[in-house]
Amino acid sequence: MKKLESRHWAFLGLAVVVVATMLLNFEPKLDISPEAKRMHSFIDSLPAGSIVMVSFDHEASALPEIKPLALAFLRHAFSKGHRLVGIALMAEGTAVGYRLMDQAAAEYNKRYGVDYAFLGFQPQIIAAILSMGESIKQTFPRDYSGHEYDSLPMLREIRKLSDISAVVSIADGNLATHWIEYGRARFNVTVAAFVTAVMVTSYDPYVSSGQLRAMVGGLRGAAEYEKLIGIGGAGRRAMLAQAASHLYVLALILVGNVIYFASRARKGRG
Amino acid sequence: MVEILMSRRVAQIVCAVFGVLLFLLFFSNHPTAKAVTLTVTTQYWQVIAAFALIVGAVSFMRVNFKSMSRKQDAPFRAVGLLGMVAMPILALGWGIGGSSPFLWVFENIQAPMQSTVFALLAFFVASASLRGFRARSVPAAILLLAAVVMLLSRSWFESTTSNILMVTSDWLRNYPSMAARRAILIGIGLGSLTTSLRLIVGIERTWLGGNK
């Protein structure tokens, strides 16, 4: 058998830390960040019945982080009585968005076509946003299930992006910037975003300038949002595992540096 | 006639005309301008995207068939090709709705596989933490310290979070990180603007196969 190297032990340790902490099924108490509070009060501030467009701008690879974020938002929006129009500007977001909207809607007894609708995927992000600014019906003549646009009652009152109260982009990359650069700049639509943790700093300048109304990021953001709406979810369940793996990584950094400086001191003496 | 149509000058003129047209349309609220925008974005742009998809699909098949004929990673390439052929068949045959085989394959095969590959990044981070992330110099030490502060601030729970830690991590995000991001964004904006202008006026010709 091939001898295990230091990195293999590091891998094994990480797997043990994540699995063991997930099995503990312990939900730690969290402080709520200002970002999560801002998003929560923004969704709260919209009058009941507002039409919010949810854009699933992500791939399936980010699902463990995106799904808790999306579900937390959908539950909050449905609980406030907002009407949601789902779309996907990345192909893989289509099936994910369709499923998540159905799941959250069922929890709040929302009716398809009246309280929510899912229009499906449209390629060419910039073109899709620009054309929705002129006509959503012409951009999506049918919904994801093949119903004619005008056959769904809630869609009859939505002609273009300016009829939408806000767009919420659920993104794992920089797609939300297109909503800011074209949706907001050209059609003055309010944009908010739920993004993966790695993208948070990319959007910080847009939040700071007010171009992005609110942003929640990562699994930690999902956990905080779940706490704000008072519903348990995958975000809170994974918090201990995430924190433990962060501390494990910090321990590895410490060990690596101790070894590095010790070997440097030995070389210096030699 | 074909020679004229295939010449690079025609392609350059089409590029310049549409570049200027889309630029002007973006700033116009005239009904005609809006109608043209709608036609360009819902029809022309999508047709071009469809052709790009065909090019991508054909290229994917050619590369994989060629490698399979050379017996390079043949089983993996066969799985890739199978997926590419099977998914459209499932979608066209049984639809893409709630209980369709297409959605079942996506949710039970494609999504878990992609999430797994993405999750492997955690193991690379673990390995890099042990073997690469070292305070070899002053800049590296500063970067390391910033990373430690950010990780700790995102790992602590209620009433255990040090106020200094939170204030420091917020400062890192709001000042050094934000300044760098803004500089990058402005750079990208200026770069995009310059490249677009070069394309429109015909200075940039690499998309036509270079300056030959």
Image: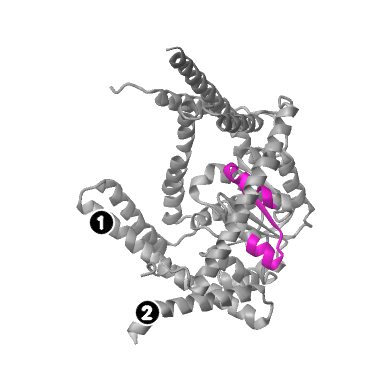
Q: Are marks 2 and 1 in contact (CB under 8 Å)?
A: no
Find residue A91 and report its horizontal and vertical position in percent.
49, 58
Q: Which residue is mark 2?
A: B7
Q: Considering the numbered disc 1 on the image, is that residue within a helix, a strand or a loop?
A: helix
What amino acid is found at the position of numbered circle 1 in the picture? Phe
Kindly identify the residue that appears in the image at 79 percent across and 53 percent down: A45
The answer to whether any part of residue A91 appears in the image is: yes
Q: Residue furthest top?
A: A269
User: What kind of secondary structure does the magenta stretch mostly adopt?
Assistant: helix
Kindly identify the residue that appears in the image at 70 percent across and 41 percent down: B175
**In the picture provided, is B167 more to the left or to the right than B82?**
right
Q: Which residue is mark 1?
A: B65
Find residue A175 and report its horizontal and vertical position in percent.
57, 56
Kindly identify the residue that appears in the image at 25 percent across and 48 percent down: B74
- Residue A175 vs A266, above or below: the answer is below
CA gap, disc 2 to disc 1? 32 Å
Q: Which residues are magenta?
A: A181-206
Kindly identify the residue that appears in the image at 67 percent across and 67 percent down: A186
**In the picture provided, is A62 more to the left or to the right than B78?**
right
